[in-house]
Image (tube, rainbow, N blue to C red):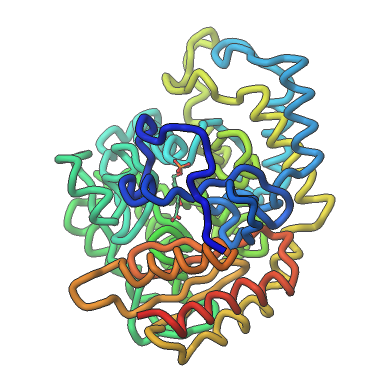
Amino acid sequence: MALDRNAVPNDLNAFWMPFTANRQFKKAPRMFVAAEGMHYTTADGRQVLDGTAGLWCCNAGHKRPRIVEAIQKQAAELDYAPAFQMGHPKAFELANRIIDIAPKGIEHVFYTNSGSESVETALKLAIAYHRARGEGTRTRLIGRERGYHGVNFGGISVGGIVNNRKFFGTMLAGVDHLPHTHLPENAFTKGQPEHGAHLADDLERIIALHGPETIAAVIVEPMAGSTGVLLPPKGYLEKLRAITKKHGILLIFDEVITGFGRLGSAFAAQHYDVLPDMMTTAKGLTNGVIPMGAVLTTAEVHDAFMQGPEHMIELFHGYTYSGNPIAAACGIATLETYKEEGLFERAAELAPYWQEALHSLKGLPHVIDIRNEGLIGAVELEPIAGEPTKRAFSAFLECYDKGVLIRTTGDIIAMSPPLIIEKEHIDQLIGTLGDVLKTLA
Ligand code: PXG
């Protein structure tokens, strides 16, 4: 049956779509009009299995009753409260609930509205923290090649994805990058790779180059998602922690993807048992339903600001929508849903099945690597010579037509399904991808 993707009444011209091939899309639109549980409904009435939890954010799946109800109720009760110099109870309640599931040692929550804003906030906090303690020379920031920390200027400066950086000028000064952790000898490793802990030693080289007293923070994704699922080699994060600690440098984990159960623990910091000074979050905090992010910090970071006259604002930073009531209500309902349904534990339980299913694709045409951890996975394809990204994008389109949603980044296919996924769905997702790979040019 021919698909009628134009079965929507609108002109598509006005909306300039983000991170999208606009002209390709508008010729053959892919529109979702409804969602429930593990599935989207398309404008042409088909069910599409959500293999990506939206954009790695709908960890509890779609149209969850508790979340829907909480948002409806909150909108009718208190729609907005000023975020500065005023409060409302749910923002405090949510902060406490986040701290309840956060690693021991993380004690404070600063709200934002997205992962990108969480990153900007954490970077600013790092610099201001050192200044508040009388170490104002610590202003340099260190990120990592292939890192993704959102799209604002701080985030693209410490980020390491060339297309997200090269169009946008000089960015922040005083930024260095660690090498990425993608090593060919780790190909087809299940879970954390054996090789590569030594890559963290490069931090010592960067520190020696500039002097530790100039460096504020190191920011990394504990598991790099956007670049195509790169796991931290065994011992790598521990080394980063030891080196940063030794030199008085803050360590920031960007947990925008890994937060809220993706790896089978609430946070990657727990999964890998490494405690950073700050964690950036968003996405799964509200199940992707209402925009909200949060930076989580230790007491040490927070307390450094709590000085001077009590009537004075301690931190000149925040957003109109920080801790927005509807977002806060959504966050509380989301965390309740995760807890009630044991979704983080479920992710850990399903991880071995997910791993074997993914690795069953080894040997199919074009497959040059497969990586996985928790309920996240990537299948890397050999690019078509001279036409990078085309092969994976074709796989994405084919899968969509066959009723499953995957993501691609370059020639890497990434999947991160809602944590409510059933084994049958895993079979369908991986089975469909396998069928598509067999026929792909
Ligand atoms: N940090 C990390 C680690 C992320 O993955 C952000 C920050 C920025 O979050 P916001 O909310 O500003 O988008 C992200 C976002 C993909 C994909 O498919 C990944 C993200 C967003 C959209 C798509 O790779 N990551």
Image point (15%, 40%), residue name: 169
Image point (58%, 64%), residue name: 404
- Between 400 and 237, the one lying in front of the other is 400
Image point (61%, 64%), residue name: 263
Q: How many marks?
A: 0
- Residue found at the very far top of the displayed protein: 311
- Residue found at the very far bottom of the displayed protein: 363
- Residue found at the very far front of the displayed protein: 1
Q: Residue 336 placed where, x, y %?
A: 79, 43
132 vs 206, left or right, is right
- Between 341 and 366, the one lying in front of the other is 366
- The quadrant in which residue 196 appears is bottom left
Up the image or down, 404 lies above or below 283; here it is below
Q: Residue 364 placed where, x, y %?
A: 46, 88
Quadrant of the drawing holding the N terminus: bottom right
- Between 337 and 295, the one lying in front of the other is 337
431 vs 122, left or right, is right
Q: Confirm whether residue 171 shows in the render.
A: yes
Quadrant of the drawing holding the C terminus: bottom left
Q: Confirm whether residue 273 shows in the render.
A: no
Q: Residue 134 placed where, x, y %?
A: 34, 31
Image point (44%, 57%), residue name: 221
396 vs 146, left or right, is right
Q: Residue 208 placed where, x, y %?
A: 21, 59
- The quadrant in which residue 161 appears is bottom left
